[in-house]
């Protein structure tokens, strides 16, 4: 049940991953209502139009939430690593990893920017902090 | 004339590592017990709804789960189904039985959970779809994303999560059939191995072999019953299928919609609930449901559970058996069964004196599904 080969093969045809290989972060864009969304799909989840294009995103976003895996569930992933939900500034949200940051310094609300990183046969959009995170972060507010 | 459906029978196997038992063998043991408990015989059964556990195929080849079990049981029912709501499936199976009976489609319906997840090979650290390429594995990592949000927004601490785990372990000590009868203190909780921060092994439910069954029947068959029937006072479901596109996805479960709606249908509030059987796959899910159902205000579940409020003898009777975290992973059918026992007054050392209203919840998949029942004696 740990086999991810099927999902990776399936994902290879994704315009999202094709663009990532070229160093571009793409979202699906509804031509009817201009809604931007991820993951790519054949229908706009906001207006159900099937007239779907794509738009390149800035790659800027923030950590909406995250977890630090301390238990390894797959030989390709050595722990610890940071799995995060990234809220991109243009609106779409995506699961990715936070890199170039000590796991204990990752915070909800931390501004991050995309980095394109080869992993296996793929190039994945991962995210690094915009500035060096400090060891004494600001106290977190009620609603990050 | 409309018929009313009631819960008439319960039965379950032991839970734990049951090497050498097949899932069919376990399911049939639970079914025989539940049918006998209700005072029915094989010939009375005209409905079958199955809830295959996490290691069981919903469809094997072209054969849906209910067909394999129904053939083994040698029955030709008037109504069938297999629930696919993940951890909400036991609760939804009872709901489906109630709806079928009240619509007149059948009159004595079995709801059956079974699995051999503990002795089966493989694990539950499956990749989460296309996002497995980022190392997104298992249910623990997913619920950790919700726990992290809860901690950041509300100041919830590991000590609060620990209260849920410790209460479950303490409750299980009064449950003769519990799979995990080992007390847990705060030091033990904090020493528990970190899996996906902030969730430790002690935040997770068990994996179990076992089966559990419930008989739902039309109230006009009550003359057949050996024991008093339990009334279904309200039912509800709510689901979140838009997942991470929804900015609230990790901030609340669909219980935030399902809970208040279901309690309102029953004409009650959380304060009226005598015993709560809340789906407890992870400690954080219990905290989020306490808020969703209105046992406390949003964000206040951490302080709410502090000081033994959900421990045995506490102000809120929550999962008296120890639930998924200590009694055993029974889908959610063991939660339904304990609600019935409490309302019958047959819960032994765990009995909540005078229990008249029970709430049962189910939560499933990637925080996508939720179902609830309000039951009354």
Image: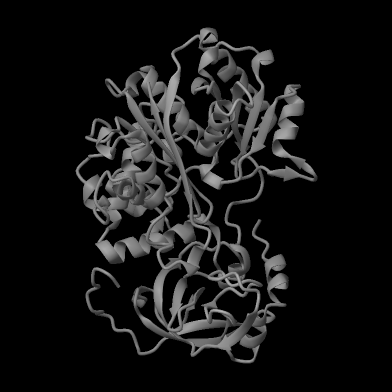
Q: Residue at x 64, y 87 (%)?
A: A19
Front one among B100 and B47: B100
In-image side of A58 versus B345 (left or right): right
Circle count: 0
Image quarter hosting the C terminus of chain B: top left
Q: Is residue B93 above or below residue B138?
A: above
Q: Position of residue B367 (x, y in %)?
A: 48, 55
Q: Is residue B11 above or below residue A60?
A: above
Residue B115 in view (yes/no): yes
Residue B329 in view (yes/no): no
Outermost front residue: B1
Q: Quadrant of residue B19?
A: top right
Q: Residue at x 49, y 67 (%)?
A: B244
Q: Quadrant of residue B190?
A: bottom left
Q: Residue at x 73, y 44 (%)?
A: B59
Q: Position of residue B65 (x, y in %)?
A: 70, 38
Front one among B284 and B176: B284
Front one among A52 and B27: A52
Image quarter hosting the N terminus of chain B: top right
Q: Position of residue B121 (x, y in %)?
A: 66, 46
Q: How was this image coloured?
A: one colour
Q: Residue at x 42, y 55 (%)?
A: B193
In-image side of B243 versus B145 (left or right): right
Outermost right residue: B62
């Amino acid at each position: 049940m740990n086999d991810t080969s099927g999902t990776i093969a399936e994902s290879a045809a994704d315009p999202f991953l094709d663009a990532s290989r070229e160093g571009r972060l793409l979202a699906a864009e509804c031509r009817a209502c201009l809604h931007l969304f991820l993951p790519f799909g054949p229908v706009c989840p906001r207006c159900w139009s099937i007239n779907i294009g794509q738009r390149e995103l800035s790659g800027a976003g923030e950590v909406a939430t995250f977890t630090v895996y301390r238990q390894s569930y797959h030989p390709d992933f050595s722990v610890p690593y940071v799995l995060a939900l990234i809220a991109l500034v243009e609106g779409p949200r995506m699961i990715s990893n936070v890199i170039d940051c000590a796991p204990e310094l990752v915070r909800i609300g931390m501004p991050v920017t995309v980095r394109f990183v080869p992993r296996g046969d793929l190039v994945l959009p991962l995210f690094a902090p915009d500035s060096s995170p400090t060891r004494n972060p600001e106290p977190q507010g009620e609603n990050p | 004339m409309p018929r009313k459906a009631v819960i008439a029978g319960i039965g379950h196997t032991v839970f734990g590592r049951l090497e050498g038992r097949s899932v069919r063998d376990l399911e049939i043991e639970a079914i025989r017990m539940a049918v006998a408990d209700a005072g029915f015989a094989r010939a009375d059964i005209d409905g079958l709804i199955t809830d295959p556990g996490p290691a069981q195929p919903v469809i094997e080849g072209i054969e849906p789960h209910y067909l394999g079990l129904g053939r083994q049981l040698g029955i030709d029912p008037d109504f069938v189904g297999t629930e696919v709501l993940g951890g909400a499936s036991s609760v939804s199976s009872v709901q489906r039985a109630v709806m079928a009976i009240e619509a007149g489609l059948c009159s004595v319906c079995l709801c059956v959970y079974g699995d051999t997840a503990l002795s089966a090979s493989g694990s539950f650290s499956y990749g989460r779809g296309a996002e497995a390429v980022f190392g997104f594995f298992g249910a623990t990592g997913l619920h950790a994303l919700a726990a992290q949000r809860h901690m950041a927004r509300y100041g919830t601490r590991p000590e609060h999560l620990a209260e849920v785990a410790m209460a479950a372990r303490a409750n299980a000590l009064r449950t003769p059939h519990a799979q995990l009868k080992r007390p847990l203190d705060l030091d033990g909780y904090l020493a528990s191995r970190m899996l996906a921060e902030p969730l430790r092994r002690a935040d997770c439910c068990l994996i179990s072999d076992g089966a559990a069954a419930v008989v739902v029947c039309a109230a006009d068959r009550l003359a057949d019953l050996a024991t008093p029937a339990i009334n279904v006072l309200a039912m509800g479901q709510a689901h979140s299928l838009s997942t991470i596109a929804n900015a609230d996805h990790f901030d609340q479960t669909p219980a935030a919609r399902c809970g208040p709606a279901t309690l309102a249908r029953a004409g009650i509030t959380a304060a009226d609930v005598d015993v709560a059987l809340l789906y407890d796959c992870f400690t954080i899910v219990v905290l989020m449901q306490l808020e969703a159902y209105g046992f406390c205000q949003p964000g206040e579940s951490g302080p709410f559970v502090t000081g033994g409020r959900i421990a045995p003898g506490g102000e809120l009777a929550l999962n008296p058996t120890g639930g998924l975290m200590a009694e055993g992973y029974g889908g959610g059918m063991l939660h339904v069964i304990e609600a019935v026992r409490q309302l019958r007054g047959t819960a032994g050392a765990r009995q909540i004196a005078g229990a008249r209203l029970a709430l049962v919840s189910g939560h499933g998949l990637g925080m996508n599904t939720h179902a609830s029942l309000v039951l009354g004696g």
